[in-house]
Amino acid sequence: MKMPRSQPKREELLPLDPEGMQAAIRDFLEWLAVHNYSLVTMKNREHALHRFTAWCAERGLARPSEITRPILEHYQRWLFHYRRPSGAPLSFRSQAQVLTAVRGFFRYLARSNRILMNPAADLDVPREEKRLPHVVLTAQEADQVLNQPNVEDLLGLRDRAILETLYSTGIRRSELARLLVHDIDLNRQTVFVRLGKGKKDRVVPIGERALAWVEKYLYDARPRLVFDPDPGHLFLSQQGGPIAVASLTDSVRTYVIRSGIGKAGACHVFRHTMATLMLEGGADVRFIQEMLGHANLQTTQIYTRVSIQKLKAIHDATHPGARLRRAPLPAQGASDAPPREELLSALATEAAEENER
């Protein structure tokens, strides 16, 4: 079963039909932009919708008004039976993402009176599997990876600071790539994470060891990497610009392989590891949730934001690399936080999303 072209060829040659799929998608994407959806969300929606319209075009369906509920159910069955070139099926998460985009598209068209009724109104998306992260490092394995960069080299020193920051804070690779120099507060030992998932800012603690490596990088390596005008980003490429996410992933993956620990992974493995080791150290799930930037988890209520001072105390007491001497675990009080399996499952789903981008 062949995957349809992402965009029908005839659409590239003929004038845009104002009542057609492509014009409707264009307007939908503009609506998302006006309502401040992230570029990643818009890109994913656009990709999913062009796949859907290509499938429709192969069946002679060119306008949203021609789409009915049975047609959408047929498309859902097609997604279920589709096989990639490798022979692997689409995951239920991937199927759900595509159908969610289609459902949102038709909801927009119905609300803007582009179609008389919404054929996707009651379309059910597949339930996603709940999985746990399959690669988590021990504290000893994490240290083996952290020790791989040659810190006598400019890029090696930068990479050591990057690895330490990922491990200590658990931030996403895209969040690390966006860090600016003034996002690191050396006195308060915190990192300001701007525009995380959902375009939400947050402040997270960073451990003493990681902070020492970041400070060494700032004074010994970054001034020799930067070119005028200074872009202001914390971690720079060899060319003096902001480090690219793809380059970041390749570099971290190389260090994991070189460490010889026998496990695979890249940036996200440190996010898994940070969460798991702090949980094992006695941290309340609610505090981990705050550090990861998860607004909420399934089956949980929305919690009052935790103060950075309290979060810093929990981080110091439970993260293996947070302090040179382990601090006592502060009293955390009663908590109705989500089960740790819920949090780890959310991390696994997040990692799958990262890998498919």
Image (cartoon, rainbow, N blue to C red):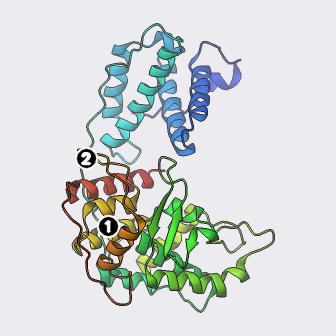
Is the residue 242 above or below the residue 40 in the image? below
Instruction: Kindly identify the residue that appears in the image at 33 percent across and 70 percent down.
Output: 273
Taking 302 as reference, is 278 above or below it? below
Q: Residue furthest bottom?
A: 152
- The CA span between labels 2 and 1 is 18 Å
How many C-alpha atoms fall within 10 Å of the one at disc 1: few (<14), some, or many (≥20)?
many
Q: Nearer the viewer, residue 147 or 112?
A: 112
Mark 2 sits on what residue? 300
Counting from the top left corner in percent of width and height, residue 268 is at 41, 64
Q: Which mark is residue 305?
A: none
Q: Nearer the viewer, residue 1 or 258?
A: 258
The image quarter in which residue 224 lies = bottom right
Query: Disc 1 marks which residue?
Result: 275
Q: Earlier in the sequence, mark 2 or mark 1?
A: 1
Under mark 1, the amino acid is Ala
Q: Residue at x 24, y 75 (%)?
A: 281
Q: Please say whether residue 211 is visible from this viewpoint.
A: yes
Please state the horizontal and vertical placement of residue 233, each as a whole percent of the image. Answer: 65, 67
Classify residue 216 as left or right of residue 67. right
Amino acid, disc 2: Thr
- Please state which of residues 130 and 217 is positioned toward the viewer in this rendering: 217
Question: Which residue sits at x=56%, y=62%?
Answer: 246
